[in-house]
Amino acid sequence: MKTKILVTGGTGYIGSHTVVELQQSGYDVVIIDNLSNSNREVLDGIEKITGIRPEFVEGDCTDIDTLRKLFTDHPGIKGIINFAASKAVGESVQKPLLYYRNNLMTLVNLLDLMPQFGVEGIVFSSSCTVYGEPDVNPIDESAPIKPATSPYGNTKQICEEIITDYIFAGAPIKSIILRYFNPVGAHPSAYIGELPNGVPNNLVPFLTQTAAGIREKLTVFGTDYDTPDGSCIRDFIDVVDLAKAHVVAMKRMLDRNDTDNIEIFNLGTGRGLSVLELIASFERATGVKVPYVIGERRAGDIEKIWAEPTKANTVLGWKAETDIDDTMRNAWRWQCKLPK
Ligand code: UD1
């Protein structure tokens, strides 16, 4: 019998790519999503790629009764991957309670119900934002957690602490916390990808929309940083590589009894790329020019951060392998399929 996994936020950007990888690895998937930042057509995309339509429940994980009904209606769920969360840094500053309610209550509800319904493990989506501005790069998992600079970042830190405290208190569950660097790109089939709401805040969707003529020009937020070309440096990781890490983490958590009940992994490439280098990669990969101007620094931006992914490489046996030009090509193919 196939192992059944609940993917919260499974029609979202990283969630949908992970559902594809789970199904292709032989897992049965149930999705819950409130469609606040995605839509039902994502299910069609998943089905086109995998030939399997995942079970879908439209609902909000902040409501514990909805979750209780889901676990009752879908007995035998062994693992959860929790993507259901709000993720816009700027919005979190404007609407902190929305972020604390969504991100914290969802996690607390899931943890609360896991033992009652025999769910053994939860993979949690965290972020490199917990490191703040690193003292050294590349940064590994033992680096200190810095005070959060936004309510969004704070929710990631608090969620990590909630899981740790719950397992320390003897809860009969396991967890793997994954700290993502900057996920970018889309599935090579171009059936699923990122669907930003309104004007994108993140670099790659803004870049591809500019290349498509939807936005007039991209603004590079600052070229006076202490980096070789002056623009900020990030660890851009292909979303399919990232999705695959979740499958490996789930397998490790559920199938092995010799691992710690809580483990933390950085998910990055180990390669820092500047904003200007990323634009160059896009232009090289697609042959499309991106009109851009140099602008002011964006408040709250980190100068440079990239991952030391050795722990994930050796312990999980996972490695980010996609070439950045291929990632940019996939992001562009996806953009070209979206309505203007
Ligand atoms: C932020 C969050 C991260 C979160 C991610 C996805 C922080 C510190 N980082 O990452 O936790 O997971 O969003 O939501 O909270 N840029 C431009 N022009 C643009 C847009 C971006 O130059 O129009 C630059 C930014 O200044 C930055 C880089 O591109 O240097 C990446 O920005 P972005 O894609 O927004 O991601 P982060 O801020 O790194």
Image (cartoon, rainbow, N blue to C red):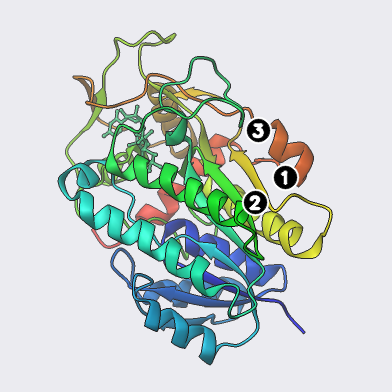
Q: CA distance from mark 1 to mark 3?
A: 9 Å
Question: Residue 22, labelled with which disc?
Answer: none
Instruction: Indicate the amino acid at tag 1.
Output: Trp
Q: Reply above or below: 121 against 237.
A: below
Residue annotated with mark 3: 309
Q: Reply above or below: 321 against 310.
A: below
Residue at 65%, 51% (x, y): give it: 245
Instruction: Indicate the amino acid at tag 2.
Output: Ala
- Quadrant of ligand 1 in image: top left
Q: Going from the N terminus, do you reach mark 1 or mark 3 first? A: 3
Q: Locate residue 83, reporting x and y percent.
A: 46, 60
Instruction: Indicate the amino acid at tag 3.
Output: Pro
Query: Is 248 placed left or right of 48 in the picture?
Result: right
Query: Is 217 placed left or right of 312 in the picture?
Result: left
Q: Locate residue 112, reporting x and y percent.
A: 50, 70
Residue at 68%, 54% (x, y): give it: 249
Disc 2 residue: CB within 8 Å of ligand 1: no
Q: Is residue 190 among the parts visible in the rendering? A: no
Determine whether label 2 and label 3 are within 8 Å by CB. no
Q: CA distance from mark 2 to mark 1?
A: 6 Å
Within 10 Å of the Cα at label 1, are there few (<14), some (14-19), or many (20+) other Cα atoms?
many
Q: Reply above or below: 78 against 310.
A: below
Q: How many marks?
A: 3
Q: Is residue 46 among the parts visible in the rendering? A: yes
Q: Going from the N terminus, do you reach mark 2 or mark 1 first? A: 2
Q: Secondary structure at mark 1?
A: loop
Q: Locate residue 3, reporting x and y percent.
A: 71, 77
Residue annotated with mark 2: 245
Residue annotated with mark 1: 318
Residue at 71%, 55% (x, y): give it: 248
Q: Going from the N terminus, do you reach mark 2 or mark 3 first? A: 2
